[in-house]
Image: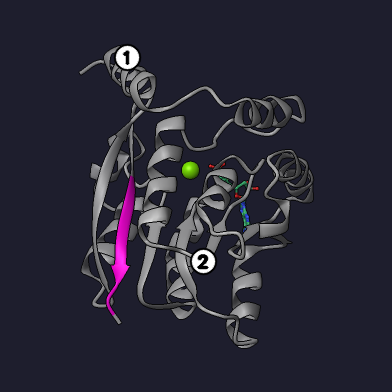
């Protein structure tokens, strides 16, 4: 399948299931104007993540990699009024844009952005006995994914949903020794995880790894 066909199928699904949303459009616009990279999840993926968060009944969600808050808005919308999204971001410039986007989306009270290297932030959270999360979304720098998975598991309970983004990367994971391929093997064979990878279309093929924490 060529990339143009993939993009048309993605747009087809979006046309069926995703309504235009001024708050999300403004978030993307402001992120772009602030010079943030356009590497957020797709609209269809946002719909999928919101549904998964709602289905899991999540009250506490952990996001690793905030960017301009586009995925975070989807997660926060899935939370009950007293729910919490903790979102970790290295770059204060990104966090600043995300704060404004969360404010405009009217979900600012549910969101806490913690700025710094997420690996350090997570270690601190483990040390300080942070309350466990119901859902974790891993979407920061790809070299960190194995560490993020280990630390996320320390902040999980049986039944926690762990989701990792960009695990297919146009098929580069099929190459021997690929970094993300190594992550996928770990994710698939982990004795605490029961999961699957869901390939997703956009301009090319990517995908999310999804697993329930067994114990
Ligand atoms: N989840 C966002 C996209 C995140 S892009 C969305 O879909 O809307 C990845 C983000 O991870 C970037 O904002 C980048 O600054 C951040 N990041 C990179 N390395 C990081 C690290 N070590 N700790 C925390 N965040 C990091
Ligand atoms: Mg991503």
> Picture quarter containing residue 203?
top left
Residue at x 29% of width, y 66% of height: 186
Pair 2/1: label in front: 2
Helix, strand or loop at mark 1: helix
- Vertical order, 2 against 156 (above or below): above
> Picture quarter containing residue 23?
top right
- The residue that label 2 is drawn on is 59
**Mark 2 close to ligand 1, CB under 8 Å:** no
Gap in angstroms between the C-alphas marked 2 and 1: 35 Å
Helix, strand or loop at mark 2: loop
- The residue that label 1 is drawn on is 8
Residue at x 59% of width, y 30% of height: 38
Q: Residue 64: where, in percent of width, then height? A: 56, 58
Front-lying residue, 164 or 113 = 113
Task: Give neighbour class at mark 2: few <14, some 14-19, many 20+ (Cα, 10 Å).
Answer: some
Q: Quadrant of the C terminus?
A: bottom left
- Vertical order, 21 against 190 (above or below): above
Which circle's residue, 2 or 1, is located before the other in the chain? 1
Q: Residue 174: where, in percent of width, then height? A: 23, 43
Q: Which residues are magenta?
A: 208-214
Asked whether the viewer can see residue 121, the reply is yes
């Amino acid at each position: 399948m060529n990339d143009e066909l993939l993009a048309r199928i993605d747009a087809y699904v979006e046309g069926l299931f995703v309504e235009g949303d001024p708050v999300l459009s403004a978030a993307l616009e402001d992120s772009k104007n602030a010079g943030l990279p356009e590497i957020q999840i797709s609209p269809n993926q946002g719909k999928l993540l919101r549904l998964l968060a709602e289905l899991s009944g999540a009250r506490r969600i952990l996001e690793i990699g905030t960017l301009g808050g586009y995925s975070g808005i989807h997660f926060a919308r899935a939370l009950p009024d007293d729910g919490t999204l903790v979102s970790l971001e290295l770059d204060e410039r990104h966090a600043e844009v995300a704060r404004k986007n969360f404010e405009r989306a009217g979900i600012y009270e549910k969101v806490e952005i913690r700025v710094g290297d997420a690996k350090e932030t997570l270690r601190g959270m483990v040390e300080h006995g942070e309350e466990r999360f119901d859902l974790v979304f891993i979407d920061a720098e790809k070299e960190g994914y194995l560490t993020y998975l280990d630390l996320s598991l320390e902040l999980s309970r049986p039944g926690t949903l762990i989701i990792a983004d960009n695990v297919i990367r146009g098929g580069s994971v099929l190459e021997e020794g690929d970094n993300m391929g190594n992550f996928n093997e770990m994710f698939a064979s982990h004795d605490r995880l029961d999961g699957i990878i869901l390939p997703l279309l956009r301009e090319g093929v990517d995908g999310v790894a999804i697993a329930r924490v067994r114990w």
